[in-house]
Amino acid sequence: MFLHGTSSINEQGHLTIGGCDVTNLAQEFGTPLYIVDEALVRQRAGEYVKAFQASGLKFQVAYASKAFSVMAMCVIAEQEGLSLDVVSDGELYTALQAGFPAERIHFHGNNKTPDEINMALDANIGCFVVDNFVELDLLNALAAAQGKKVNILLRITPGVEAHTHDYISTGQQDSKFGFDLGNGAAKQAIAKALTLSNLEVLGVHSHIGSQIFEVEGFRMAVDKVAGFAVDIRSELGLTFKVINLGGGFGIRYVEGDTPLPISEYVGAITNAIITNFKAADFPLPEIWVEPGRSMVGDAGTTLYTVGTNKNIPGVRKYIAVDGGMTDNPRPALYQSRYEALLANRANDPAEETVSVAGKCCESGDMLIWDLELPKAESGDLLAVFCTGAYNYAMASNYNRIRRPAVVFVKDGSADLAVKRESLHNIVENDVIPARLAKSALAK
Ligand code: PLP
């Protein structure tokens, strides 16, 4: 059985999460429903903090809010002592509205607009992660206009790319993000930043990929960044105070996935930092990381109601649920895989292999291929696990389907964090231009 965090099966054979029977949640909040296991989110945050404390290094764990940006999550991040990484005015606004301390917010992105930069300057956020030469000049000018000097990290592409089990060391990295280390752009960027009087260069940032199951890629990135730090100190006289190693720590979506414990990722990074920087007689920098998926991914479960089915003898049986690519576009986008069970009959033995389709007008709107399940009937509840990251955050209104509600569950109570969208929400920003309305009246 594929259960995470506080999930278990009760005497009625119902899935429970955070002490709440999901059949009751379906009745109270409707389906589809995103359910967040709050205790598991807090546990993950604590694992990061504890692992860094054990290293003795100064650190910030910045939750990458792109994974799941809602105000309740920002409050939890704040309570757990995390910092927050945002990449748009919307994510920044969400954090500020939630009362998240601005000085612990880091602003990312490869095309921050002047309005977004001004909003972040107005709020006095803690750090901008500068991505390119255009942004260096723009940020300096806008900070000067406000009479401020702002902390920056420069995002560099270190020439290491990691995906799950593969990591590669590349010479010149083909990426839309950051200043390339290999071709000298990163050094030029630091030299330039040092001439801009409204920017304070704290150090550099590197993010090598996502859903990574090994530590080797992180070690390689640390080696490269440490070598760069030594070069910059001797050539430009700047000593990095902060090194940010991004996110990308993997989680277990399906049985075969083999992520490492958080303490191992953090331990590998902090050990590599200590070894490299001590060897170079360099003051130990403060280490920042930006986990998104590994903070919230396995704490999320999406609950659907099964509706229709279609059996094509000898080919495949489809069962359709009341959501799909609108609440979880990841299978359609990247062939992501998920595990699921029938949440109202969790102890029933599997009887057939089915594929779970969504309700959108797209053949590619599939959530899971070839899932072993008891015979699912209309009205059964299907729980899909590990949907906490990049699900609600990536949800859309395709086919004008309403985005589901989000509930946080803990110790037997279930609390709404995001309301289900109403039909009114679907049309509230629509405007019928007057000339169309007039011609409609004339008919
Ligand atoms: N930091 C940066 C710069 C990213 O681009 C991402 C993800 O795309 C993250 C952090 C979070 O990554 P993950 O959710 O894999 O931990």
Image: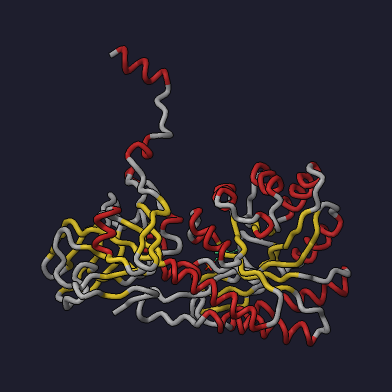
Residue 79, image quadrant: bottom right
Q: Residue furthest top?
A: 442
- Residue 29 at what x, y percent from top left? 30, 53
Residue 285, image quadrant: bottom right
Residue toward you, 287 or 42: 42
Q: Is residue 182 visible?
A: no
Residue toward you, 84 or 438: 84
Colour scheme of the picture: secondary structure
Q: Is residue 441 above or below residue 220?
A: above
- Residue 216 at what x, y percent from top left? 59, 83
Residue toward you, 430 or 344: 344
- Residue 370 at what x, y percent from top left? 25, 71
Left or right position of 172 against 77: right
Q: Is residue 377 visible?
A: yes
Q: Quadrant of the N terminus?
A: bottom left
- Residue 385 at what x, y percent from top left? 35, 69
Q: Residue at x 54, y 77 (%)?
A: 47
Left or right position of 50 against 238: left
Q: Residue at x 79, y 70 (%)?
A: 240
Left or right position of 53 against 295: right
Q: Quadrant of the C terminus?
A: top left
Q: Residue at x 57, y 80 (%)?
A: 265
Q: Is residue 369 above or below residue 124?
A: below
Q: Quadrant of ligand 1?
A: bottom right
Q: Residue at x 74, y 54 (%)?
A: 133
How many badges with numbers are in the image?
Answer: 0
